[in-house]
Image: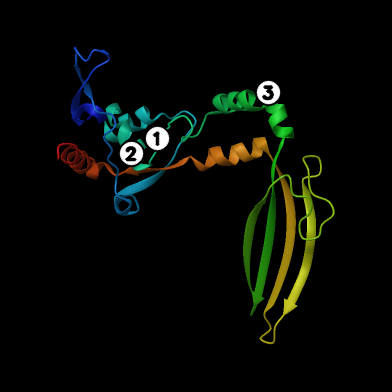
Amino acid sequence: MKYFENFPRILYTFDQNLIEFKEVVDIFTRVRMLDSVINNVSVYYTYQYKDSDTVEGIASKYYKDANRHWLILFTNKILDPYFQLPLNQEEFDQNMVDNYGSVANSQQSLHHIEKHTNVITAKNGILDLQQYVSIIPTNVLSVDGSTSLPNISNPIINVGSNNVVSFSDETTVDTSVQLIAISAYDDSVKRNENYRNIKLIKADYVNQVETELKNLLTL
């Protein structure tokens, strides 16, 4: 099913004298999939989007109809397929050139600093590691009393380490803090990779989703 084929039609004119009207698709009609459906693991599975993929190709393979690519965008709340799906390497490199002049410049441009707080808890021989990450903007001059901050040439600074606290029940907590410089390139890589995990509605439910969409659009 094509996404817009069941959208309502309206009369619209480009004529300032309002003489001639044409029937057009009302693209401002809005519908969305309920979060309760999207979050129901029984109706979808997670797919790892590859560089060679397109939503049309995935729809053709899994739903036997390339026109059902809208279902993938719909399920993942994707409004802009260019910026909300992972770029392949060529597209990614071109994006770096467009934004920073070259890939090399993006690798040398400081985007932000991350504060990594690592907490290791040991009790009865069992270790538990928790890591907390916060973003430090580049205009900050000091973090936790540190007189120096990391940069692209010196990307990691240990602010504090081996701050061990022992408790009467033999539990120990070891806290360490690192400041890590993140380049524009690495930040963009992380963001790009985060788009790879997409949800695909299982094929058994596709007809049901399409029927529900038709019903909503014809109310």
Residue 68 placement: quadrant: top left
For the point 64% across and 23% down, the residue is 97
Mark 3 and mark 2 residues within 8 Å of each other at the beta carbon: no
User: Is residue 48 found left or right of 40 in the rendered image?
Assistant: right
Residue identifier under label 1: 79
Residue 210 placement: quadrant: top left
Q: Does 183 sit above or below residue 21? A: below
Across and down, in percent, residue 31 comes to: 27, 40
User: Is residue 123 found left or right of 202 in the rendered image?
Assistant: right
Residue identifier under label 3: 101
Name the amino acid, label 3: Gly
The residues tagged by marks 1 and 2 sit, at their Cα atoms, a distance apart of 8 Å
For the point 21% across and 15% down, the residue is 18
Name the amino acid, label 1: Leu
Numbered circle sitting on residue 196: none
Work out whether residue 63 can be spotted: yes
Camera-side residue: 33 or 130?
A: 33
Work out whether residue 65 can be spotted: no
Q: Does 129 sit above or below residue 135? A: below
